[in-house]
Image (cartoon, rainbow, N blue to C red):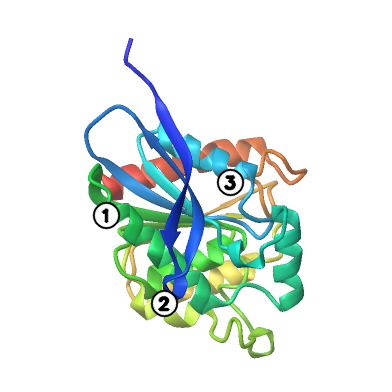
Amino acid sequence: MAYEALFAETVLMRGHENVQIDAYLARPLTGGRHPGVVIIHHMPGWDGPTKEIARRFAHHGYVTISPNLHFREGKATPEENSASIRAAGGMPDDRTMGDVQGAIDYLRALPYLNGKVGVIGYCSGGRQTYLAACTLRGIDAAIDCYGGGVVAKPEDLTPRQPVAPIDFTEKLQCPLLGLFGIEDTRPSPDDTAKTVEALQKYGKTFEFHTYENAGHAFFAVDRPQYRQAAALDGWKKVFAWFEKHLH
């Protein structure tokens, strides 16, 4: 039988403005070099389910890091940090992108990386993944899992989130996979269609899939929105996408 082993731990990394923040690192212990994945966690925070996803990627042969994007809130639980972020008007895009860039750079400095890094995000993290794929350096593939707010009306923009990610589409630097639910309202099927139109306009490499009988957060096994059929097929597409572009 083939040897299987994982190693996972909390690490410290440098994020936006060189601030030291927590991150969760999970990797295989099978030797050799492996592709890297940055997980951008959902608005509920840097929680147990996010770390479980990191271990799942490690089991499949990826060196995975998930930065704690709510670290600066300083509350006792992910739920409290999330509530603080929501009350303040959401995550500031410049700070989030600085932290994600720090996570990419952290992976790229590891001696056991194969030189390729992907980014995946869920919910608000899907929006942030789209933004990262258009504005950051060192990303070889990206996956947006039902990221709401990629398309935004002028009245939805704020000082913390001043530009809709779709407006950066021309600068998209890597292949993009998008996974959505037909019953979702953020992003709605109309939002997804507008994103497809923008990606086609600029000749980008992408694949979008929208699942029937699924809405927002259909990957989340610990939430009522979980949809088994969509999640199982979605995971197949996730690993196929990273297999194609990160190996």
Write the residue at 46% across / 72% down.
16
Q: In the image, which is nearer the foreground, mark 2 or mark 1?
A: 1
Whether residue 44 appears in this view of the structure is: yes
Q: Are marks 2 and 3 in contact (CB under 8 Å)?
A: no
In terms of secondary structure, where does tag 1 sit?
A: loop
Q: CA distance from mark 2 to mark 3?
A: 27 Å
Task: Quarter of the image for the C terminus: give it.
Answer: top left
Write the residue at 74% across / 43% down.
223
Please tell me which residue lies in front, 124 or 73.
73
- Residue 139 at x, y percent in the picture: 32, 62
Residue 59's place in the image compared with 165, above or below, is: above
Q: Are marks 2 and 1 in contact (CB under 8 Å)?
A: no
Q: Which residue is mark 1?
A: 109
Name the residue type under label 3.
Thr
Residue 105's place in the image compared with 243, above or below, is: below
Q: Which residue is mark 2?
A: 169
Q: Which residue is mark 3?
A: 50
Q: CA distance from mark 2 to mark 1?
A: 28 Å
Q: In the image, which is nearer the foreground, mark 3 or mark 1?
A: 1
| Quadrant hosting residue 85 | bottom right
| Callout 3 crowding tier (Cα within 10 Å): few <14, some 14–19, many ≥20 | many
| Callout 2 crowding tier (Cα within 10 Å): few <14, some 14–19, many ≥20 | many
Looking at marks 3 and 1 on the same chain, the residue that comes earlier in the sequence is marked by: 3
Q: Horizontally, is 24 left or right of 114 in the view?
A: right
Name the residue type under label 2.
Thr
